[in-house]
Amino acid sequence: MFDYVKYAQELRHELHQCPEIGFDLPKTNAIVKRELDAMGVRYTEEFGKGSIVATINEGKPFTIGLRGDMDALPVQEASSNPYPSQHPGCMHACGHDVHTAQMIAVCRQLNDMKDSIRCRMKILFTPAEEYITPGCKMMVENGVMDDIDCVVTAHVDPNQDVGNIALLAGGINANSMGIVIEFFGKTAHANSQHKGVDAIRMAVEAYMAMELIVAREAPSVEPCLLNVGAFNAGHTNNIVCDYAKLFVSSRTHSDELTAFMERRIREVCEGVAQMAGGSCKVTVTKLLPYVDNHPVMVEKMRQTAQKVLGAEHVLDTKRTMGGEDFAFLSRKKPGVLYRLGTRNANNPDTASALHNDHFDVDESCFAVSIPLFVNFVLDNQDGIVF
């Protein structure tokens, strides 16, 4: 009998060693296509750069989408696993190697069973989940969800023990807004500061003022975060800096608060620049809506998981401030994202936070996710009433 779990583990090791960023995923795409070719599964790359969509049982009346994201992060790996990244400065620090490997294995098992399955399955391998331009947004705009009736995915979770999954109906994470703020000043010699306009000053003042938006203006009962992740300015010590650039992330649980944050960030930064005699440009580079888990899909996943794993391994979870471009798929058609436990007390790296340079998973999680996806399809192959 074919061992789908071992197959996924071996694929994960290969994928983990070749992490790639954004839409440029040549090695990752090659691995996915190699495996699909070996299965004889038809696929297309028509939904945008870096994307692959495989189809099983073309022509069936009901279609279930299953999604695995493929891209990595610009992080230098420091974990202790024996198959580390071979791409310096790049790492699968968010578990997308797991997501891709498990979805290839799910595809293989479903294809092996296809003659006894009464629905069509589309397996979406998506790029650029971590990128400024989200891969799922591109694919939705190119029509990937037009003939899909519902969609499911999982995300690894180092806060849950391996063997467990966690579910939540409704909003499961946050709106994620990425903003680039540029300040424009005027150079001068450091001994004649009054003749220049200091862009660093503007950026520092704006940083502090934006922190006060969260502390003093955002409603205290609504979750709201703001993070300045990069601050780039200046070249040397004796020149007044004329250009500074901030990379900012804002996270909220409501569309209204996200709109408020964008407006106030613009007003604050423009005001700071005007007072200093300079100017600024505020650009929203990324806006992910929150994932809205459809209650019917959550209940269907819960029923399957309780059957496959046992009720004691199907947990409730709380909403987080994370972002996830699966939102574009689940806003188009009913969807569910479940959290896949990957923590093992005997391996400290598996408790490391997402996006951490020590991040790792307990690969026995594949024994949970693969049968869960497959059985979800089998349990719902005749359609779902929403």
Image: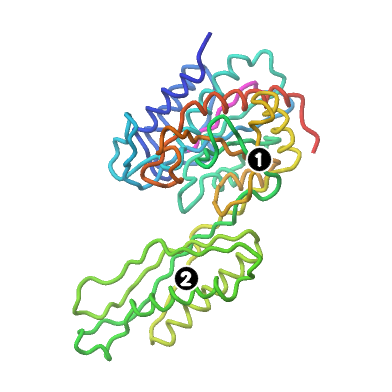
- Which residue position is annotated with label 2? 282
State which quadrant residue 217 falls in: bottom right
- Which residue position is annotated with label 1? 167
Secondary structure beneath label 2: strand
Q: Look at the image and say whether residue 55 sits in the magenta stretch.
A: yes
From the viewer's perspective, is residue 174 above or below residue 150? below
Near mark 1 (Cα within 10 A), the count class, few <14, some 14-19 or many ≥20, is many
Mark 1 or mark 2, earlier in chain: 1
Which residues are drawn in magenta?
51-58
From the viewer's perspective, is residue 173 above or below residue 192? above
Q: 245 or 44, which lies in front?
A: 245
Q: Residue 308, how many percent across, how many down?
A: 66, 23
- Residue pushed farthest top? 1
Q: Residue 4, how many percent across, how many down?
A: 51, 18
Give how far apart the Cα atoms at labels 1 and 2 are: 37 Å
Q: Residue 107, how many percent across, how many down?
A: 56, 23
Q: Look at the image and say whether residue 177 sits in the magenta stretch.
A: no
Secondary structure beneath label 1: strand
Q: Residue 273, how many percent across, how many down?
A: 42, 82
Chosen colour scheme: rainbow
Magenta region, main secondary structure: strand
Kindly identify the amino acid type of the residue bearing the numbered disc 1.
Answer: Leu
